[in-house]
Image: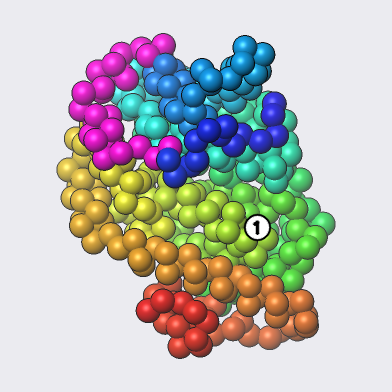
Amino acid sequence: MPANFQPVHASHNNAKSTHTERESFGRENVRDSLSSLESREKSIRNAGKKWFGPVELLDPKARAFEHSRQEAILHPLFRLHRLSCNLVPEAQRLPVTEQDVFSAILVLNRLCISVKSPISTILAYCEARSVREQNPRLNQLDPLQLRHLLTFHEDIPHEEMNTLDINTLKIACEKSDTGAINTWFKRIATRRHALPNAAPQYLRQMINDLWTAGQRTFLETFATELAVLDATLLDALGWENSRLFLAVFKRLHGSAGRFASAYIDAEEIDAAIAMYTLLNDADQLIHFRALATAFDATALRRLERTILTASKERGSRFATQQPAPVMPPKAYMSLTTAEVEAMFARKNLGIAG
């Protein structure tokens, strides 16, 4: 399995599908996309080719190598897709979007770089998690298993994030104790250089597990803190991992997952609208159309800068001194996302108003 999935001739931005293509996904190509596994895999292959760019100008040897490399990348996507298809009756399957194919390639690439686990281990994890869910709706809305790719982890519990640490956080979440959640993330970040690379993935899985168990009110605080920790560990890449996870979470849980609304972008909202249109889910259509109307790209960029600034402040503070475990968390740690942004703006950290 190659260590890097970056495209040869196409950038991620250029690979984004157009509004016309999204409408085509929602209308003209629905019947073909739903008709058979073969046609669905063809659409995945075509999206992969678009991601990697044309190979016709390469010499025969280079072209053969590139075809082989792309097949090695597409094969895991086919496996993930077949897993979803096995759990959803054919008549109820939704089309696979180009955007999801691009995202799956990016996530697999990041896993190969950061976690360095065999692809067979990653696929086995996704399979186990999907079967355990017993929820065809999630497989309908996430046919490439992005929700599980973004939570894949090994080597946890770990010396620097052990069972006691994990249980302490779970108890704080179950009690909706935002102060304890803030303090936990503040303390765990002091060990950032020794944390396992998959620590954020494990914490994202905890969001899924607690949500399934009926826990809700802790999630806004947890999501903000996790995004900051992710960025503390991996900078902009960590932010995008958290953002994508929360955007997928938002698509899956719709209006119930209001805390994740700040992390979803316009194209992802369009994709959710197309999917819920096919599902004839009027309530979710109203919700996502309202999100589309109110969407503010500037606010999303401002949130990104807020999270990245918070992660850098946290990292620089811990580099100079280790806070005592009994110290209360910084004030911004217990605030909402909007309040965090306002506080950083007042501190003149370069965040747009």
Which residue occupies the foreground of this view, 17 or 36?
Answer: 17
Residue 2 as seen in the image, left or right of residue 137: right
Q: Is residue 84 visible?
A: no
Q: Give the image location of residue 214, x and y in percent.
A: 44, 53
| Number of other residues with Cα within 10 Å of mark 1, as a class: few under 14, some 14 to 19, many 20 or more | some
Name the residue at 43% across, 37% down: 15
Mainly helix, strand or loop, the magenta region?
helix
Name the residue at 49% across, 72% down: 306
Which residue occupies the foreground of this view, 241 or 54?
Answer: 54
- Which residue carries the number 1 mark? 234
Q: Give the image location of residue 331, x and y in percent.
A: 54, 85
Magenta stretch: includes residue 22: yes
Q: Give the image location of residue 276, x and y in percent.
A: 25, 38
| Colour approach in the figure | rainbow
Q: Give the image location of residue 128, x and y in percent.
A: 59, 31
Q: Secondary structure at mark 1?
A: helix
Question: Start and end of the magenta stretch?
Answer: 15-39
Magenta stretch: includes residue 92: no
Name the residue at 35% across, 19% down: 89
Q: Is residue 48 above or below residue 182?
A: above
Q: Quadrant of residue 160?
A: bottom right
Quadrant for the C terminus in the image: bottom left
Residue 152 as seen in the image, left or right of residue 141: right
Residue 251 as seen in the image, left or right of residue 187: left
